[in-house]
Amino acid sequence: MTSGPGFEYDVDLPLIVAALRAEGLAAEAVAWDADSVAWDGFDLVVIRSTWDYVTRLDEFLTWADTTSAHTRLLNPAPMVRWSSDKRYLLELAGHGVPVVPTRILEPGDQCAEADFAQSADVVVKPTVSAGARDTARYEPGQAAAAVRHARMLLDQGRAVLIQPYLSLVEEGERALVFVRGVFSHALRKGPLLTEPGVMDNFRVPHPDLTPYRPTEAELRTASAALAAIPSSQTPLFARVDLALDENREPVVMELELIEPNLFLDTNPRGLGLLVDAVAAEAGLRAA
Ligand SMILES: Nc1ncnc2c1ncn2[C@@H]1O[C@H](COP(=O)(O)OP(=O)(O)O)[C@@H](O)[C@H]1O
Ligand SMILES: [Mg+2]
């Protein structure tokens, strides 16, 4: 399951489709919002690069619910709904999972420069986003701009996350990929918010990717995040993005259960795990 931008930019998808076909499965890449798709004609529908959902969230979540009524959708629609809004970070924290310290402003809340009166940089971003859209970092002297940014989002009816800027992302954020709960591979990626005070919706979403071997602590934190997903099902795929806090402890930046890049082009192990998992979920192979 993909989208217009997905057909253009998703490097995982052609590999997945080809690998499934090589296994004898009838795999097809279809845009989630394509006209008159008979979803009940598929044994399994796997969400991959539905990257245009961010600005059409209600429509997308309704599509996920409706499609689930006709076929098996993975990840499951309730998990997709939960993962679409970064307010889940507070829920994870409530389960004892280390997350980026996060404050939330809801539409209707007041927001003033006093909210940004700290001595270090701060990040303002919407609770629903991807690819660092509408996201920026502000230095202590830029509180007025931070307020304008937050108010703009609140005025659009969007909830806002306020976080300290974790400067160790400049050494690299970690992206850990799991297939059916099993750790597959990890990458390190460069920082996105390199210029304070700048909102840029055309950033390269995963700059400077390099293979990465996670530490035990990182694997523990990522596994704790997966264990805290409010579902009895294990996600078919998950990507846990971790940053390091000022004590170099890993904290969850994002738990991606909808349409993460899985970086399978450089990780054949991940591709193999996913193909096996999809075949099993489609009922075509023993689980
Ligand atoms: N608190 C933060 N500290 C440092 N960098 C951040 C912070 N929040 C976001 N970023 C940067 O912005 C990017 C996008 O933010 P993220 O929370 O992952 O949202 P999304 O990827 O859904 O847009 C991150 O990969 C990171 O580079
Ligand atoms: Mg991210």
Image (cartoon, grey):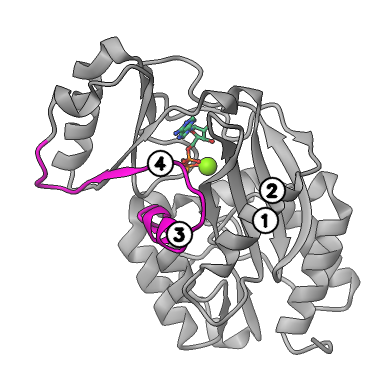
- Taking 217 as reference, is 208 above or below it? above
Query: Residue at left 63%, top 83%?
Result: 42
Circles 1 and 3: CB distance less than 8 Å? no
Residue 110: image x %, image y %? Answer: 9, 38
Residue 270: image x %, image y %? Answer: 81, 58
Question: Quadrant location of the C terminus?
Answer: bottom right
Q: Which residue is mark 4?
A: 101
Circles 4 and 3: CB distance less than 8 Å? no
Query: Crowding at label 3, few (<14), some or many (≥20) Cα neighbours within 10 Å?
Result: many
Query: Residue at left 61%, top 33%?
Result: 248
Query: Residue at left 55%, top 86%?
Result: 71
Q: Which residue is mark 2?
A: 217
Q: What's the distance in space between the residues labelled 2 and 3, CA to CA?
A: 17 Å
Amino acid type, residue under disc 1 in the picture: Arg
Query: Please, what secondary structure does the residue beneath circle 3 have?
Result: helix
* Among the two numbered marks 2 and 3 on one chain, the one whose residue lies closer to the N terminus: 3
